[in-house]
């Protein structure tokens, strides 16, 4: 099996991608400091516990596994938190990515897939948002990811790295086979929080902002199933390895989203419908750094790589999240929910 080094592979998107990589015949070697991930999610290859800022440890991992590529997921991820702790975000996300690129150059590993984000666009002027849209992030998190995109493009030009950038919209759902899910502690993402509220595992969901210029006043996001995101990584990796240097300097850059937006209130209503339970909500002011609407123009990934999301419907994403969350918390679900007949 061809090894691929996966930084952040113990986290939500990284662990699902490791499962997809293994199914596609690669050996995912996870490099993660477990600051926001779990060793239990590393099931398809070895785990190297280490910090991406530790260049010597990274180089040692690259030297011993000789991966064909690196997938760089490791980062701090929460836009609201980045407004309060910008320097931590710049150190981990920007200096961390520089350390990963330096280690790759020093070790002669040439292929890199970088996890970027819809947050690089900021408040969109055009929806759905095409990849060529103006990049004007509204949070230190989004700025950190944009800085890394630019730094890595310079490294492509100077060091011949072969880079692909995936800008994900909102990852949601969980492994449909129930082997993995979203288990941040504390959790900050809307879908798992609303599911936990519905199951009585936490108090009311705090709804951040009801005065946005959207149809119901709450933020609109493009929720993409985490297993579809994982599949996009396998497609882009195969393309990078296959094309190996045929178009030097090119940086394929793709949105990964469904092209459909859902408001926070729609997410809450879907969680209520899927669980058959009420989702208690407490309305609160806007969360700093949140753009009103983020919806992908997702046709480039479809047209270039043939990517077709298998689970584009929010109802399936919520159901998979519910099944995993309920399983972990030992909450019994009605049969109709477990086998997908509800709602
Ligand atoms: N979840 C989303 O909706 C979303 C959307 C757009 C982009 N992204 C990007 O995708 C990537 C993965 O996101 P996620 O939701 O899986 O996050 P996550 O927090 O679940 O996973 C990130 C992993 O990186 C690890 N990590 C963090 N800092 C590290 C360091 N210094 N050294 C080693 N490991 C470190 C954490 O322990 C964790 O396991 C991130 O780069 C994020 O910015 C996520
Ligand atoms: O308790 C909560 C949590 C979230 N929200 C709202 O729900 C929406 C989605 O919020 P999430 O925290 O689930 O996701 P974000 O859109 O803030 O960010 C996620 O998607 C982005 C890309 O769109 C990023 O890349 C980022 O890493 C990832 O966390 C936002 O309007 C947020 O204000 C609430 O109202 N209450």
Image: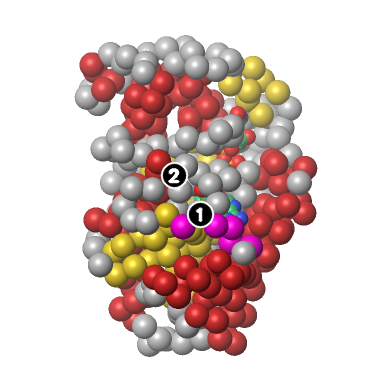
Q: Say which of 308 and 26 sits in front.
A: 26
For the magenta stretch, what is the residue range? 48-53
| Residue position marked by numbered label 1 in the rendering | 49
Q: Position of residue 43 (x, y in %)?
A: 33, 48
N-terminal-most mark, 2 or 1: 2
Confirm or reject: label 2 Cβ below 8 Å from ligand 1: no
| Residue position marked by numbered label 2 in the rendering | 39
Q: Is residue 140 left or right of residue 58?
A: right
Q: Position of residue 338 (x, y in %)?
A: 26, 22
* In this view, 282 is above or below 26: above
Dot 2, how many residues are within 10 Å of its Cα: few (below 14), some (14-19), or many (20+)?
some
Look at the image and tell me whether residue 227 can be seen.
yes
Q: Position of residue 198 (x, y in %)?
A: 47, 17
Q: Say which of 206 and 324 sits in front.
A: 324
In magenta stretch: residue 49: yes
Label 2 residue SS = helix
* In this view, 280 is above or below 170: above
Q: Position of residue 115 (x, y in %)?
A: 51, 59
Look at the image and tell me whether residue 170 can be seen.
no
Position of the N terminus by quadrant: bottom left
Q: Say which of 300 and 32 sits in front.
A: 32
**Residue in the picture at 31% in, 58% down:** 21
Q: Indicate the quadrant where residue 284 lies.
A: top right
Mark 2 and mark 1 in contact? Answer it, CB < 8 Å: yes
Position of the C terminus by quadrant: top left
**Residue in the picture at 24% in, 63% down:** 25
Label 1 residue SS = strand
């Amino acid at each position: 099996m061809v090894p691929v080094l996966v930084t952040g592979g113990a986290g939500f998107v990284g662990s699902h991608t490791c499962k997809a990589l293994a199914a596609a015949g690669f050996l995912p070697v996870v490099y993660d400091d477990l600051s926001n991930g779990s060793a239990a999610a590393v099931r398809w290859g070895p785990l190297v516990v280490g910090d991406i800022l530790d260049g010597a440890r990274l180089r040692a991992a690259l030297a011993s596994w000789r991966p064909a590529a690196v997938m760089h997921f490791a980062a701090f991820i929460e836009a609201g938190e980045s407004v309060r702790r910008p320097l931590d975000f710049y150190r981990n996300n920007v200096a961390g990515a520089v350390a990963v690129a330096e280690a790759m150059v020093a070790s002669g590993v040439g292929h890199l897939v970088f996890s970027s984000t819809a947050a690089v666009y900021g408040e969109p002027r055009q929806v759905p948002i095409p990849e060529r849209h103006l990049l004007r992030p509204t949070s230190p998190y989004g700025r950190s990811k944009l800085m890394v995109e630019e730094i890595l493009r310079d490294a492509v030009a100077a060091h011949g790295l072969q880079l692909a950038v995936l800008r994900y919209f909102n990852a949601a759902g969980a492994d449909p086979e129930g082997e993995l899910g979203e288990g941040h502690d504390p959790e900050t993402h809307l879908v798992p929080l609303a599911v936990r509220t519905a199951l009585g595992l936490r108090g009311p969901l705090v709804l951040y902002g009801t005065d946005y210029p959207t149809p119901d006043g709450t933020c609109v996001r493009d929720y993409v199933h985490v297993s579809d995101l994982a599949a996009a990584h396998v497609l882009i990796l195969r393309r990078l390895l296959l094309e190996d240097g045929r178009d030097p300097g090119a940086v394929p850059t793709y949105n990964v989203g469904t092209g459909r937006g859902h408001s926070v209130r729609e997410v809450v209503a879907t969680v209520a419908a899927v669980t058959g339970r009420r989702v208690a909500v407490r309305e609160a002011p806007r969360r700093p750094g949140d753009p009103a609407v983020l919806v992908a123009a997702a046709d480039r990934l479809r047209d270039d790589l043939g990517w077709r999301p298998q689970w584009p419907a929010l109802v399936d994403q919520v159901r998979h999240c519910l099944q995993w969350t309920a399983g972990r918390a030992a909450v019994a679900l009605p049969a109709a929910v477990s086998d997908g007949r509800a709602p």
